[in-house]
Each structure stands twice: as structure tokens, then as C-alpha cells.
Amino acid sequence: MKVLVVGSGGREHAIVTAAAKSPRVEKIWCAPGNAGIAALAECVPIGAMEFEKLVAFAKERQIDFTIIGMDDPLVGGIVDAFEAEGLRVFGPRKNAAILEGSKAFSKDLMKKYGIPTAAYEKFHSPEAALAYLETAKMPIVLKADGLALGKGVLICNTLDEAKAGVKELMEDKKFGDAGNTIVVEEFMTGREVSVLSFVDGKTIRIMSSAQDHKRAKDGNEGLNTGGMGTFSPSPFYTDEVDAFCKEHIYQATVDAMAAEGRPFTGVIFFGLMLTEDGPKVLEYNARFGDPEAQVVLPRMENDMIEVMEACVDGRLDEVELSFMDNAAVCVVLASDGYPLSYEKGLPIDGLERFEGKSDYFCFHAGTKAGEDGRILTNGGRVLGITAMGADLKEARAKAYEATEWVGFANKYMRHDIGRAIDEA
Ligand code: AMP
Ligand code: GLY
């Protein structure tokens, strides 16, 4: 089988790594890919939003199966573009990717179908939002309706902050049209858990849980990022939480999408908050998390390609997922200054230390090959260092040990990934 993966980050490196393990896969291409992915796949210089070129490439190379890693192309309708040409592709169609693409849509869906989530109101004008905020309880959460690279969420402690937030999202249009509509949401407290799942339109299969660390600095200080590190499984995702979510959240979401005439095929990522009143949905994503994929996929015992094909063919009910009885931790090595401004193009040393080690992974997020063949930094998040261990503590110690194997001039990381493990 010939496989094409669309995307270029650490998540896509983890997807390509899992695909390469499948005995059914003879060759992998990745568009556009990165310097790490290039060791397993042939990278093609086509951007993830260049649908016509991607479709033409898939036809020309007779690609049997395409996997879309990223949210933007999914929300933009890449799956519809592939299907229109009779190509097999893993991911939700545009009318289902809206689950991630519009927060107003997903909140309305949850309300209509009784899926637990924070109370909210949505607004299409700044005047209406400001009038509502005058009497609202603080802190409060403002969310741009559309995609904003995970940065369109503002947590406001005071009325003044909330007013400034409305200006930023709706008047200054910091995230463009994503802020034409905003959702104003009740502030919730609790632990966050990321749960990824495979879905075939009707059936859902849950993967092992994970926890992300979204803030840039130790102690959850600093700005929100794409994610600075993860661990899996989450010790806070108990059997009781699992049973509650199975009863009230997972299948209910899949059924709601089908009932709306928007059957969802692909990965649903449930961002959950474990509140005092039980688990509630913070957000949905229509794809694997990054860096959640980097701790969940290495622990999956199934052939990922077989599971994805079962999703596309609508026979996921025949599949049971199985995960290793171990744990994984991923520590992201970023460029100092991320997520604001940072230097790129710096040489990376020590990458060869990961070769031939089955329980350590160096997932490339932002790298490129330099003219002399050396691998250079090429982004805010540069590498994701994942290690597996018998338990979370061992995995964490191994991941941090391996962060020392590689170096680049502006290397930055959080030192407290997985600290929550000690409180479990
Ligand atoms: P989202 O993109 O919706 O996951 O939001 C990004 C982050 O903002 C989440 O991971 C939470 O840490 C935080 N957040 C979002 N919504 C809420 C809420 N209603 N209450 C508290 N924190 C929230
Ligand atoms: N790590 C969070 C995300 O992928 O959205």
C-alpha cells in the first residue's frame, strides 16, 4: 500500500512512524514533511492547503490511502477534495470538521444533545458581548469562533480584561474572521485530560488518555503554546471518569453528528476538564493532538493503518484497540522565545543518539536539512523527545535524560512535564 501523510509537525512524524510499522505499507510520502520525517518517507514540497496539487500528486503516484494530520486542511474541506476524485482518505469531511472549526457550532451541538460542557452565550457583535459582560461573573472565558492556532481563547479575571478581550477578538480582529463570532463561557476549574478516539461515522473507539502542558513556562506560567509536553496515560483518567464519559460524552457526540447529517469519520480529540461536577467537554478537535500523538501512538499495539481503514470503510465495530501496559512522556524542545519570536536555522547535534532505540523517539516538529546535509531548527517547537517506561515516573526520567542527548544554540524546554504524576 502506498500512503500519503499531509502535515509537517511532530504529530505527523508520529503518524508516519506508526504507518511505517505496518507490514501492509510499502512506501510513504509526506507533504510537506520535515527533516525527521524524511528518514521514513519521501517528502514532497506541497503545502497542506494546496488541495489541487495534493490530489493531482495522489492520482499521479497512485496513492492508496491518504492521512490528514492537521486541522486547517480538514476544516477547509481537503477530505471532500480527495473523495471527489475517488481517492481513499482518512479524516472528517468539511461538514464534520466544523466540530473543531466552529466553537459556536460545537457548543450548540453539546447544548442540543445534552453533552456536559461549560455554560455559554455566543455573540456576533461587540456591543452585545460587552452588554452581557457587564453583569457576568468573573473570571470568564472568551473564545474566537474559528481556528486561531489554539490561541483564540482568553481567560479574563476582571471586567476590564474581558472588555479588552472583546476588543482584541472582535474589533482589532487579532485572529481575523475567526473572531467575527465569539463564545463567552463559564470558567471551569479542574484537571485537564486529552482523549483521542477513532470514529467511523457510527462507532467510536477510545485511545489511551493523555495530558498536555499548554503554557510556555514551568509552573504553567507564560503564554499558551501548541503544547510543551505530554504524558500518557493520565492517572486522573480513572475507570469512573471513563464510564461517565462513555455514557454521556463519546457515543453521544458521534450520534449527535450523525443525527445532524454530518457523520464524523476520523479522529475526535476530546479536551476534557474533570470538574467537581464531573467531566465536561472543553473543546473538540477533529484530528490527533500535537504532542498527544507523540505519547499515544507509540503505545498503540494495533496496526494504525488497519484501524484507519476500518474507519473509512465503516467497520470499526470489528476492531478493538489495545495499548501497551506502560507509559510515555514527551518533552518538547523549543526555540527560546517561542511562542513569540525566536531564531531559526541553527544546527542540531546528537540526533544519531536515538538510532536503534525502541523505547526512545525523537519526533521532529520544526526542522529542515541544511545545504551541507546538517539538520537545522526551523520552527518554534523543534523536537519532541518521547520515552516509554514501565510507569510514568520511569518514562519521565528517561525522557528528560534523552533531552540532554541533543543540542542547539537556543534550546528551551519546560522542566516540569509530568509533575502532576507526583500528585496522583
Ligand atoms: P481550548 O482551545 O478551548 O481547549 O482552550 C485552550 C485552553 O484554555 C484549555 O486547554 C483550557 O486550559 C483553557 N480553557 C478553555 N475553556 C475554559 C473554560 N471554560 N474554563 C477554564 N479554562 C478553559
Ligand atoms: N495539544 C493540543 C492540540 O493539539 O490541540
Image (cartoon, rainbow, N blue to C red):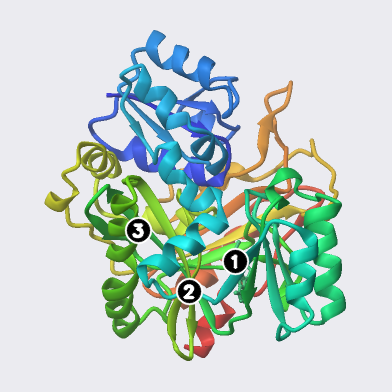
The answer to which of marks 1 and 2 sits earlier in the sequence is 2
From the viewer's perspective, is residue 182 above or below residue 424?
above
Side (left or right) of 78 relative to 143: left
Q: Position of residue 30 (x, y in %)?
A: 49, 27
* Residue drawn at 55 percent across, 46 percent down: 10
Side (left or right) of 68 relative to 399: left
Q: Position of residue 34 (x, y in %)?
A: 59, 32
Name the image quarter holding residue 135.
bottom right
Residue 40 in view in this figure: no
The front one of 342 and 108 is: 108
- Tag 1 secondary structure: helix
Mark 1 Cα shell of 10 Å, populated few (<14), some (14-19), many (≥20): many
Residue sitting at the far top: 60
Q: Position of residue 192 (x, y in %)?
A: 52, 75
- Residue at label 3? 299
Numbered badge on residue 117: 2
- Residue at label 1? 400
Amino acid carrying label 1: it is Tyr
Q: CA distance from mark 1 to mark 3?
A: 18 Å
Amino acid carrying label 3: it is Arg
* Residue drawn at 87 percent across, 77 percent down: 160
* Residue drawn at 70 percent across, 57 percent down: 151
1 or 2: mark nearer the eye:
2
